[in-house]
């Protein structure tokens, strides 16, 4: 019986996420399907704004970086179960999410806005919730959360951003609720069938997600973010990855995200 108990304890230890965790490795979760922030290059390697930010953070913390490509709605469960140390995936810090995980200080300011159909009557977020209107949202996003309050519109909850855009392009949905940067990109890709209503109806901030109680890592991450901003790291990221978007925001009179 003692031998059996010892074996069971050993198996439980081997199955524990903390047992397998290498403190020299910083495991960062993100969904590599949100260019130019999180994406993969032609060889399948992670690249983008968030990838560069994660690399700089790992270097500052003196740890080797490991990026895990995880579907957006699986990021928080992966963080809570110890599969990853933190999540960095263009995630808005919301009170609802903060009940499940902790967040770093914000590193980017954005807003929820609309990609509307060219012939759609939608002009504002309030126009979306009308009888006969159809609105597309990506599952697990703040657009999805916002659309839960709609009483009259039909809400299409889809797994992929591209599927939401296609609904608008084909005239099957009146609007897609998403962030400013993405709405701008999709309008530029489909100028004949869509409109970008970039003025945000809900302001948001992105932050890095951490497990509840992981205060030491949270302090390290916040210190890194402040120092990275002070040495113009975010300005450099904007120049490298977001120069056209920054110019478009400036032309529209809308403050840029960094």
Image: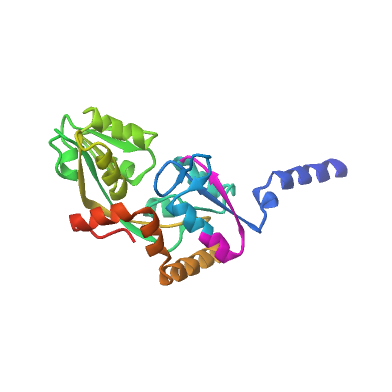
> Is residue 149 visible to us here?
no
> Residue drawn 19% across and 39% down?
128
Residue 167 sits in which quadrant? top left
> Residue drawn 55% across and 48% down?
67
> Is residue 247 visible to us here?
yes
Is residue 2 toward the left or the right of residue 44 in the image? right
Depth check, front residue: 85 or 31? 31
**Position above or below: 138 against 88:** above
Depth check, front residue: 2 or 35? 35
Quadrant holding the C terminus: bottom left
- Residue 3 percent location from the top left of the image: 87, 43
> Residue drawn 38% across and 35% down?
160
Is residue 113 toward the left or the right of residue 215 in the image? left
- Residue 224 percent location from the top left of the image: 49, 67
- Residue 233 percent location from the top left of the image: 43, 65
Residue range corresponding to the magenta coloring: 56-71
> Residue drawn 48% across and 42% down?
40
What colour scheme does the image use? rainbow
- Residue 56 percent location from the top left of the image: 51, 61
Depth check, front residue: 216 or 51? 51
Q: Is 198 contained in the magenta span?
A: no
Quadrant holding the N terminus: top right
**Position above or below: 154 against 240:** above
Is residue 13 toward the left or the right of residue 159 in the image? right
Q: Is 58 contained in the magenta span?
A: yes
């Amino acid at each position: 019986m003692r031998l059996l108990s010892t074996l069971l304890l050993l198996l439980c230890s081997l199955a524990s996420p903390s047992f397998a965790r290498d403190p020299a490795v910083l495991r960062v979760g993100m969904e590599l399907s949100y260019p130019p922030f999180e994406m993969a290059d032609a060889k399948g390697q992670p690249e983008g704004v968030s990838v560069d930010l994660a690399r700089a953070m790992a270097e500052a913390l003196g740890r080797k970086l490991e990026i895990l490509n995880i579907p957006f709605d699986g990021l928080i469960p992966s963080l809570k179960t110890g599969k990853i140390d933190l999540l960095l995936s263009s995630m808005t810090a919301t009170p609802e999410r903060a009940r499940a995980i902790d967040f770093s200080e914000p590193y980017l300011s954005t807003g929820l806005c609309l990609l509307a159909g060219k012939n759609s009557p939608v002009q504002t977020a309030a126009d979306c919730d009308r009888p006969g209107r159809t609105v597309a949202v990506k599952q697990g996003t703040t657009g999805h959360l916002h659309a839960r309050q709609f009483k009259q519109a039909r809400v299409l909850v889809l797994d992929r951003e591209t599927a939401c855009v296609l609904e608008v392009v084909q005239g099957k949905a009146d609007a897609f609720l998403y962030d400013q940067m993405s709405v701008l990109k999709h309008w530029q890709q489909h100028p004949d069938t869509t409109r970008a209503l970039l003025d945000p109806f809900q302001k948001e901030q992105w932050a890095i997600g951490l497990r509840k109680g992981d205060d030491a890592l949270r302090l390290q991450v916040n210190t890194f973010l402040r120092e990275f901003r002070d040495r113009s790291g975010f300005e450099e990221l904007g120049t490298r990855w977001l120069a056209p978007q920054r110019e478009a925001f400036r032309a529209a009179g809308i403050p840029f995200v960094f």
